[in-house]
Image (cartoon, rainbow, N blue to C red):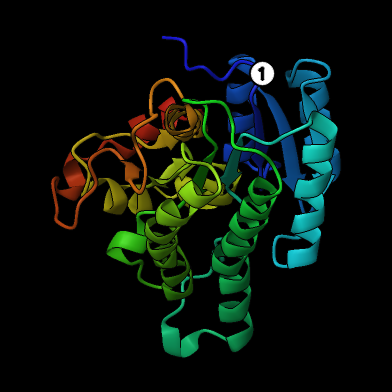
Amino acid sequence: MDLGLQDRVALITGASGGIGQALAAGFTAEGARVALQARQRHAALEAFAAESLPPDSFLLLSADVTRPAEIEGAIDQAALHFGRLDACIVNAGIWPPESLRLDQLSPARIRETLEVDLLGAIWTARAFMQQLARRKPAPARRGASLTLIGSTAGRFGERGHADYAVSKAGLYGLVRSLKNEIVALDPEGRVNMVEPGWTATPMAEGTLHDRAAIRRAIRTMPLQRVATAADIARAVLFLSSPAAAAHITGEVLTVAGGMEGRVQWESEQVDAAGIQRRLGIA
């Protein structure tokens, strides 16, 4: 079906990562234009955009989501460049790879994770809503859309990564508060969250080479596969669609193969090697 994204403008934070690039490719394939924010890896993002996205469909932005003035400036720049913003995807985030109990975590790591993953989401959503407040509401049935990228860690917790789990759990409160606030700025405005589970991205690449870690994760999922970045992007495209999701707001769409808090498979029943082969991991 036509998602109604033609000529819409989407801001994507954390666009230099795997999910960010999949989002950019997905939106532009639907005829949208994208403003792509990154704090670092600017050369890689520029090369990706030049090689993979239609000319004149993108704007590259350099900003730190932990600094409110910087993300506000980036969003203002995007709105000025394209004339408006229709969608915002709050995707920027970090996952410190070292597994440590809370009593072993340094205050510096805890603060950084919360600054990027939780406060960064708040500052981005705040800046997007400020932009909406400065414009007239979109035409009927074409309301603004704000989508946060959460994590199943925020629902189930994650041993050794309490800082990350807490930061993602906080997004539940943000979604369910902002869905009631955005309509004061745009009567058709919507706020939702996509909640990935295990996803094949550069951030998770090291863990995905560990077959024992794959078995532990897949044991709680009826679908024996790891999501791709494109799986997450397609869920975001759906929620951002004024045609397909016009009456969906305040919801969390989990993209995690049916993950739940109990064991579905014994370790020996999980084909970790097959999962790696599907992901192209030797």
Residue 276: percent from left, percent from top: 42, 34
In the rendered structure, the answer to whether residue 13 lies left or right of residue 180 reads right
User: Total number of numbered labels?
Assistant: 1
* Quadrant (top left/top right/bottom left/bottom right) for the N terminus: top left
Is the residue 92 above or below the residue 33 in the image? below
Residue nearest the observer in this picture, 130 or 245: 130
Is the residue 159 above or below the residue 48 in the image? below
Q: Quadrant of residue 96?
A: bottom right
Residue nearest the observer in this picture, 58 or 277: 58
Q: Which residue is mark 1?
A: 7
| Residue occupying image coordinates x 41% and y 81% | 101
Q: Quadrant of residue 124?
A: bottom right
Element on which disc 1 rests: loop
Q: Mark 1 packing: few (<14 Cα in 10 Å), some, or many (20+)?
A: some
In the rendered structure, the answer to whether residue 225 lies left or right of residue 94 reads left
| Residue 202 in sight | yes
| Residue occupying image coordinates x 34% and y 52% | 212
Amino acid type at image mark 1 = Asp
Residue 46: percent from left, percent from top: 84, 34
Is the residue 143 above or below the residue 170 in the image? above
| Residue 44 in sight | no
Residue 231: percent from left, percent from top: 44, 30
In the rendered structure, the answer to whether residue 242 lies left or right of residue 27 reads left
| Residue occupying image coordinates x 33% and y 41% | 253
Residue nearest the observer in this picture, 109 or 146: 146
Is the residue 228 above or below the residue 150 in the image? above
Q: Quadrant of residue 245?
A: top left
| Residue occupying image coordinates x 50% and y 51% | 184
